[in-house]
Amino acid sequence: MAALILSFLVFSISLLVKTSLSSPSDLQILHAERQLQKFVECVLMGSIILQQVENIGDTPTSEVLLAFPPAQFDHLALVKAAVTVGKKRKKSYVPLEVNPSEQPEAPNGTKFYAISLLNPLAKGESTTLEILYILSHSLEPFPVEISQSESQFVYYHDSAVVLSPYHIKQQATLFKTPSNKVESFTQVEPTYLNGAELKYGPYEDHRPYSYYPIIIHFENNHPFAVVEELEREIEVSHWGSVQVTEHYKLAHAGAKHKGVFSRVEYQSRPGASGVSSFKHLLAMLPPRVHSVYYRDDIGNISSSHLRTSSKKSELLIEPRYPLFGGWKASFLIGYGVPLQDFLFESAVGERYLNFSFGCPIADTVVDKLTVKVVLPEGSKDPSVKVAFAVEQSLEKKYSYLDVIGRTVVVLEKKNVVPDHNIPFQVHYKFNQIFMLAEPLMLVSAFFLFFITFVAYLHIDLSLRK
Amino acid sequence: MVAAKMEKSPSDLLTSSGISSVFKSLKLKTKQQEFLIRVTILGLIYVLAFITRLFSVLRYESMIHEFDPYFNYRVTQYLTQKGFYEFWNWFDSESWYPLGRIIGGTLYPGLMVTAAFIFWTLRFIGFAVHIREVCVLLAPFFASNTTLVAYFFGKQLWDSGAGLVAAALIAICPGYISRSVAGSYDNEGVAIFALLLTFYLFVKAVNTGSLAWALASAFGYFYMVSAWGGYVFIINLIPLYVLVLLITGRYSMRLYVAYNCMYILGMLLAMQIRFVGFQHVQSGEHMAAMGVFFLMQVFYFLGWVKYLLNDPKKFHSFLKITVTSAVGLGAIALGVGTASGYISPWTGRFYSLLDPTYAKDNIPIIASVSEHQPTAWSSFMFDFHILLILFPAGLYFCFKRLSDATIFIVMYGLTSMYFAGVMVRLILVATPAVCLISAIAVSATTKNLTQLVRTKSKPAPGGSGKGATSSKSSSKLCLKAVAERVKMSNATNAANAFELIVYHVPLVEGSLDQSPPFQKNVAIALLVGAFYLLSRYAIHCTWVTSEAYSSPSIVLAARGAHGNRVIFDDYREAYFWLRQNTPQDAKVMSWWDYGYQITAMGNRTVIVDNNTWNNTHIATVGRAMSSYEDEAYEIMRSLDVDYVLVVFGGVTGYSSDDINKFLWMVRIGGGVFPVIKEPDYLVNGEYRVDKGAAPKMLNCLMYKLSYYRFGELTTEYGKPPGYDRARGVEIGNKDIKLEHLEEAFTTSNWIVRIYKVKPPNNRW
């Protein structure tokens, strides 16, 4: 995954004139520097610095293309770009808009992201871009199966040079492995290995779409905790609380566990046995969280700890058993938070819920995230504001004493990384009167019950006199 | 409005008097007051019965706690998800592999259908509850309902006071709580309600002779049949009761109507339950009811003939002929039926009730269950407390005021007490009877005493003749009461009893002829004593419920070194591991105790489970467990076993593990396969696991799986490695090698160990 992102970045280094008139080769890049390192457990973060992206064509261009190999493109969780403004110490970054882009004539199915520049680059002008991308699932365990006492090794596939539709004059790639143990790597001279740092380059003058496949094989005992599916249900009650229920399907996506699981060894030699397995996870919950529970299909899981402070709440959850490669665990976490922390009234009289989007468990990737916002019964016109692209749909849900059902806003997103953990808003209209509907129903039911009793006691139903 | 005001304003005086009259009418009459108090008390008892059963939910969590109920839970889930017809026709291939089990035809569906019905009702009226919550709280809910039935039953037997006391006693009686705490989602939970309801309705039908009540009791019986195999008790007790009434000359038209209607309709309804089917006409256990039914007809016929003949002599000869021929016919029918196999003989379970030693000699699978053991005296005391003493007192009162109803409760009490003595779990059946009879004792005694206190206070100043007689009668009552007190106190507090006799008896004696100044005090003292005893009962019940009956067997708790609670959640750890990390179609072999849980929580196929319908299959598993590994491997291969699960308590000191159950596996296995011999596993008749153990024991599969690599572990400070804490010995075989199996998973406290059966080696 990381490799994919990497090459994507490489591509994007070269500047592309967006207008169909200008061809990609209208831009050239003087110097590209790529760096790849661990982001969270099984996720790589790549960064590319494109120095002196220069327009050598005639027409001004406002778009720079980033290229990625198709395999890498699918694993890209996030791409961010910024332009550097000012020099040296006063340097500051201005974020730029990045969007997937189709280029029909690209070779080998290369995929693109387009960076929109703030000001079009006129002929001869140049700019410096910094790109950050995150690749999930790009480390491939090899050997595929390991026993309890073995370490986990992974493959990483990428290109020695930055894949780019532009001409790059000089470039280098630095790869930081999580440990010093690098089993093997493809040599593309010049290549240096220094401890945990593997440097490809510097390379001079590579033509557009240059690609030198490399494989790096290194030890990585970081547990590959992957949430295969996460469904968050955020239920808003205007009686004072927001109830969150999160259904997790957790898996260890690293090298599969093979053969014996020995408890003796796991207990007595924690350093040498099951090094790539993990026992617990940390979930960061909002402050002032209450009634937290942690359970699964067959009941409460007693091994969890909650630490609360005024700024944050940390929930340390321990699945029922340690997770080895290929093992799975599904569970659910639920908690309540005070309404006033998350529900606000906008200027136009609408209400909006402001809640964080991503997975509260630190350091994990979520393959498929579904966020369901259950609005109170009787709310109207829901609309969602999210900072990135998500699939939206509406549902109905029937909960306690519901008659017409509650509107549920469903948001779906694939490949979610901790960077997606930013607030989103759901705006809706709600009439306070609806709050009273359910209590009134209860009151009238009891009233009717007593009335029937009184009537029964006063009416003689017997046939005989 | 205005007109009304206009009318009212001139007559101010009238209005004020009107208001006061309104107030007066608002003031309750004594009868209404009594009704209100009764309803309030019943309401409180109803709530009490429910909340006293919630200890386990509050301390642990809302979950099913025991082994067996997991099957019921699983079936209920299936029922609510797939609907009734799917459930009724469900063939479960996940249990008894490779045989499978026809669920719809081999279970009592009453419990599941009740839970599903409550679930659907709640859903319908807008309560989004989970089926688990319904299942967990079903038993307490039905216990609450049982208190209501107990009240009406008590009212029917004696008076409404006795009914109230019965409701209160049964609400907290440990004998009943043991099977009806929240989370014990078992058949007995609803069955006791159904049992008592059927009896109540039948007694009511006998008392009134009303067809409607008899019909109601037939439906109660139907519900009971649908809920629990214990219905056999009803279908034998009621005929026995009818027989006793016939013999004691209490035959009446009311009895005829009640029994015939109840028997015929109840039988027809019961046949609708597939598991019961035609047993009512084909099984030896149900023949008594049929015999009594025909006897009733003969009786009625004779009465009719007697009425027609109007001649004792002729009738006498007629009687001889009819009775002889009827008995002869019955005997022949029974003999032919039994001989031809149409009527099945009594089952082993039934035999073991009549002869407590039967199961031990002939059916090890029944004898191996701890709740099928004969009851110890201590557990009677534990489950009944003062009721055990009040019970004979109540019997005395019943005999004093013999009626059709009291005869019934006496018979119910005596027979169920016998069965409670035979089997621990049948204490449950005796509990309602014991509570009702004790309630009669308590109610009658306190009623007499309070009457004494009240009548005394009125005539004392006047000293009229009326007062004297009432004091006489009340002093008699008082004497009786003292006798009662003495009886009661004998067992509980000898010193107290002595005091009672020394101080109170002479006082009462004296009060017989001269209007005694102390009589009232004595009565008050006795009342206080009764109150004290009853409050001790309440305290005992709460304590027992909290300490003994509310700890789940699926989650084990212990006290840590610092007094904190340590939870061993190993069972669920293992089951969840199976559920998540084994192939969907994996077959798990374990001893049958864990079968239901593995299918319900682990969602995997098992070889045998708690529905012990196939003894041979269980014996095969027992044989595999007690053979050497290579022999066991053949058996496991033939059964397609992928995983073997054993429960092991050596690390935690959990004593009900498989090693301690192992001799039963040997016995059950040896019962079918004579290659397995119990003496091979014993040394001089002694069961050991240490160095001195029998060689076969040290190398059998169960031993190997339990102790595999246990020899490397130090369990207790200052003890050698491989020290078994459950049995307190160092194990005898520390160097265990497994050839055909490999350790797949062991839980964090080693309580559950799962092994994977390796595929056979390549032949070349």
Image: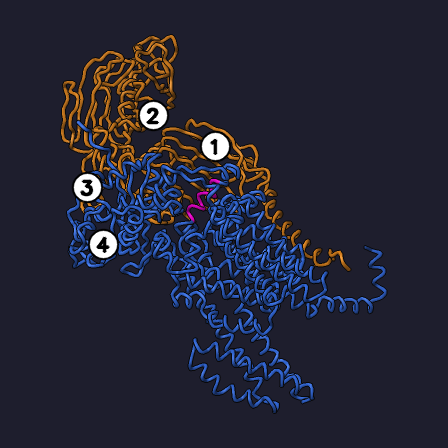
Chain colours: A orange, B blue
Q: What is the CA distance from the residue labelled 4 to the residue labelled 2?
A: 74 Å
Residue furthest bottom in the image: B514
Identify the residue at image location x=28%, y=54%: B660
Q: Is residue A219 left or right of residue A461?
A: left
Q: Is residue B320 above or below residue B468?
A: above
Q: Is residue B661 magenta?
A: no
For disc 4, the marked residue is: B679
Q: Chain of mark 3?
A: B
Q: Amino acid at mark 4?
A: Pro
Callouts 1 and 4 in the same chain: no
Instruction: Please tell me whether mark 2 sits on a helix, a strand or a loop.
Output: strand
For disc 3, the marked residue is: B738
Task: Please tell me which of labels 2 and 1 falls first in the chain.
Answer: 2
For disc 2, the marked residue is: A79
Q: Is residue A136 above or below residue B361?
A: above
What segment is highlighted magenta in the picture? Answer: B69-78
For the residues labelled 4 and 3, say whether their Cβ atoms are less than 8 Å apart. Answer: no
For disc 1, the marked residue is: A410
Q: What is the CA distance from the residue labelled 1 to the residue labelled 4?
A: 67 Å
Foreground mark, 2 or 1? 1
Q: Is residue B81 above or below residue B155?
A: above
